[in-house]
Amino acid sequence: MVKGFRFQVLSHDREARCGLLRTPHGDIETPAFMPVGTQGTVKALVREDLEAMGSQVLLVNAYHLYLRPGADVVRRMGGIHRFMNWNRPVLSDSGGFQVYSLARLCRVWEEGVEFQSHLDGSRHFFSPEKVVEIQEALSADIIMPLDECLAIPAGREALGRAVTRTLSWARRSKLAHTREDQALFGIVQGGLDMELRRQCLEELLEIGFDGYALGGLSVGESKPEREELIRACAPLLPRDMPRYVMGVGLPEDLVAAVREGIDLFDCVIPTRNARNGQLFTSKGKIMIKHAQYADDPRPVDENCACPVCQNYSRAYLRHLYSAGEILSFRLNTMHNLYYFHELMRRMRDAISREKFSEFENRFFQEQALASSETRPGQSERKGE
């Protein structure tokens, strides 16, 4: 492990586990959900909001911060923690997924990725070394290497090429990484092909990283396919290192992945869906814009202790959303992130008491009884 970085498993309940991830900017109790602050901000919230609701670690995106305001600007301002006034851990994503999904005329080859900015069409080139350089300038606590993520379905030949390239870039990223106060995770690719996933992980283990992530999820696979893949991959990941599933974030997905021993998660679902009026509750999801809430005096969730549920009615939240008020984004986001952090806290508590199976059964029973008013989960990987 690098300087100031240590992971310890504290308790188990079958495969589910609680841990403590120490970083130079503080400890993370796992399993943990990372709110997405793509451009150095979790939309509509300030630091005090995030701290009050229990956020332990934030995710930022190297692609977006490289394009605007520029990694050198962040470095001159003292690094990402000082720049965004957040003195707790930060994980930076490489931005590889955003290059493939957002950039214009993206071209990938062995040396790296050439692309046009989605902002102004300017041309750029990301090599594995360049992406590490950007993230070292950002000064995040945990950084991710450039990898190649293919949408599902993808043919085995294309997946094999992507795994080969991901491994080559991982080796180059490891050689390029110089900061002793910054952890570098490896990313396991391979689509739904377990042979390729196993091959990718084995070679990543030979290279040696400070933690390991499952990438290439929430990109077109079905929920059963995703759960089966995580179930098959999790036991192969090192037991004494943090395990991270990238871009997966519906509540039921989090519970299923924690059951298999996953420690870290990120997704834009709680924040993006909040801005679209979808709120998560202990009884399922609701769309606050629906007319049935126009004169509903109840809080969003009567079992929730967040400031929104303690102070505002569904009727008021519906009014704000219908009127297009900025406050709607803020209050909805506060509630959703509080719900996600509370869900993780409850899972940590259940694991520590060896009651996770009971928690899981109760959770899915409540979900089954709830009448969802929204479309099924959709890919949310493009970022905020």
Image (cartoon, rainbow, N blue to C red):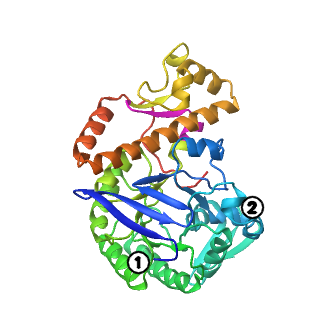
Give the amino acid at mark 2: Arg
Q: Position of residue 251 (x, y in %)?
A: 40, 44
Instruction: Give the labeled residue for mark 2.
Output: 68
Q: Residues within 10 Å of mark 2 (few under 14, many from 20)?
A: few
Q: Is residue 294 magenta?
A: no
Secondary-structure class at tag 1: helix
* Residue 122 or residue 323, whichever sits in front: 323
Instruction: Give the labeled residue for mark 1.
Output: 160
Q: Position of residue 89 (x, y in %)?
A: 56, 60
Pointers 1 and 2 in contact (CB under 8 A)?
no
Q: CA distance from mark 1 to mark 2?
A: 33 Å
Give the amino acid at mark 1: Gly
In the image, residue 128 sits, relative to residue 357, either above or below, namely below
Q: Quarter of the image for the N terminus: give it.
A: bottom left
Where on the picture, by quarter, is residue 181? bottom right
Q: Is residue 281 magenta?
A: yes
Q: Residue at x 32, y 75 (%)?
A: 198
Q: Residue at x 64, y 42 (%)?
A: 45
Where on the picture, by quarter, is residue 138? bottom right
The range drawn in magenta is 273-283
Residue 93 visible, this angle: yes
Q: Residues within 10 Å of mark 1 (few under 14, many from 20)?
A: many
